[in-house]
Image: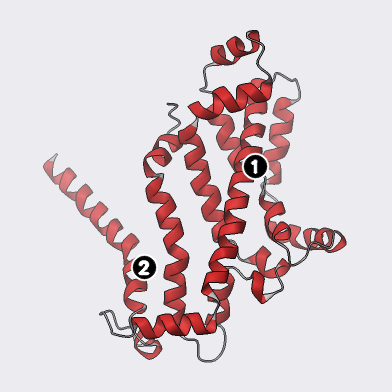
Amino acid sequence: MKIKNLMSHIFLIICSILTLFPFVWLGIGATNTSSQITLGKISMGSNLFANFASAIEKANVLMGLKNSLVIALSITVLVLIISSLAGYSLVVFPDSKRELIFKVMLFSMMIPFAGQLIPLFKIFTKMKLLNTYAAAILPSISSVYLAFFFRQSFKAFPKELIEAARLDGLSEFGIFFKIVFPVMKSTYAAAGIVAFMGAWNSYMWPLIVLQSNKKMTLPMMAASISNGYSPDYGALMVILIIATLPMITVFFLLQKHFVQGMTGSIK
């Protein structure tokens, strides 16, 4: 038994090292020059402030941070509301076609986003929404995956509370926002982390619809710096660190709720 526990700990330590190494290497790379990074130097350097100044010079990092936050937070809030309402309705409201609707929703997940790019681009072109935050936000405000996630969580919600609220004359929206929502905070936290990370890392669609430098997000800025014959890897590392910090912050702030939400607990 001791040998088994020892092997398990060794395996977990190796996995932890492999998981943390990219972040450590990112931090080390931000302190070295491009040539040192290319040569694979894995020790701290003294070029951090020069790389930071180069990143500020080559990309409007604060503007990119603001654009990424506006888009990611808007998508997160809207997708949580819409997907949770969809999941709630699939569980609470009895309907003979409910399972059919749910199967159609799951089937839509099989359509790759690349196959939706041209139709979406034509729609937003006709709506004259190109190069606006709305164009980057609207296609992502609903998620079948999160609707499925909420549906599975709502199945464990006590139906007696909903019935008692209906008898007291509370509307369905009142039941949802005053009773269901406060109880399911852990589920919302877990879904919020997933939604925020997906929106924050989004690159392909914003690259297509945000055609102005003033609307560029941090992933777009990082890609623009890495292009060319002689990329400035030091500045790129700085931008990637700045782009990573919000995700790490959100995850650690909601870590406890994330674990509870993923395991389906309701508190």
User: Could you give the CA–CA distance between mark 2 and mark 1, rounded to whole angstroms?
Assistant: 31 Å
Among the 4 quarters of the image, the one containing residue 48: bottom left
Q: Answer whether residue 253 is visible to the viewer in this image.
A: yes
Residues marked 2 and 1 touching at CB (< 8 Å): no
Q: Secondary structure at mark 1?
A: helix
Q: Position of residue 110 (x, y in %)?
A: 67, 48
Q: Secondary structure at mark 2?
A: helix
Q: Amino acid at mark 1?
A: Val
Residue, disc 1: 144
The N terminus, quarter of image? top left
Q: Mark on residue 49? A: none
Residue at horizontal 79 percent and vertical 61 percent from the top: 129
Q: Mark 2: few, some, or many residues within 10 Å (few <14, many ≥20)?
A: few
| Camera-side residue of 205 and 62 | 62
State whether residue 218 appears in this view.
no
Residue marked by disc 2: 22
Q: Is residue 29 above or below residue 259?
A: below
Q: Residue furthest right?
A: 126
Instruction: Check the image and name the residue furthest to the top.
Output: 167
Q: Which label's residue is closer to the chain start, 2 or 1?
A: 2
Expressed as whole percent of the image width and height from the top left, the position of residue 20 reads 32, 62
In the picture, measured across the screen, residue 156 lies left or right of residue 103, that is left
**Quarter of the figure with residue 18:** bottom left
Q: Amino acid at mark 2?
A: Pro
Residue 191 versus residue 41 in the image, above or below: above
> In the rendered image of this protein, does residue 64 appear above or below residue 145?
below
